[in-house]
Amino acid sequence: VQLQASGGGLVQPGGSLRLSCAASRTIFGITTEGWYRQAPGKQRELVAIVTVGGSLSYADSVKGRFTISRDNAKNTVYLQMNSLKPEDTAVYYCNKRGGDWGRPFDYWGQGTLVTVSS
């Protein structure tokens, strides 16, 4: 399975971007789908996650500004990012975790760079 992340780019403070993460095929047994980010010199951190049951969770730093969603028919998870700040600059990675027939999986996208700067 390959996850293809896209939608990153350069945006001014206060602007918006929508990231997409498409899987190469339908994945069965997903328990969580999420977005993480890693800024230069920092550890990777969780940004937003959605569970198989539809529960949503966000990092405090993005609450009220970012929204995670998914389209199961397209095997795609999205991250709508509004009111972007320079501190949101990072490489954003999508992730899908779960288990299929008792075998756990942990798939990662290649990362897409988001730069927030004037």
Image (cartoon, grey):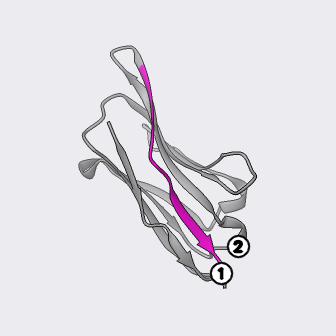
Mark 1, residue position = 13
Q: What SS does tag 2 mark?
A: helix
- Badges 2 and 1: C-beta atoms under 8 Å apart? yes
Tell me which label, 2 or 1, sits earlier in the chain. Answer: 1
Distance between the alpha carbons at the discs numbered 2 and 1? 6 Å
Is residue 89 positioned above or below 37 on the image? below
Q: Quadrant of residue 66?
A: bottom right
Quadrant containing the C terminus is bottom right
Amino acid identity at mark 1:
Pro
**Front residue of this view, candidates 70 and 103:** 103
**Where does the magenta region start and end?**
104-116
Farthest front residue in view: 41
Helix, strand or loop at mark 1: loop
Which amino acid type corresponds to the residue marked 2 in the rendered image?
Pro
Instruction: Give the residue at x 39% y 16%.
Output: 103
Left or right for 38, reference 32? right
For the N terminus, the quadrant is: top left
Image quadrant in which you'd find residue 64:
bottom right
Q: Position of residue 56 (x, y in %)?
A: 54, 48
Is residue 113 highlighted in magenta? yes
Left or right: 68 as drawn, with respect to 65: left
Residue that carries the numbered disc 2 in the rendered image: 86
Q: Residue at x 70, y 73 (%)?
A: 86
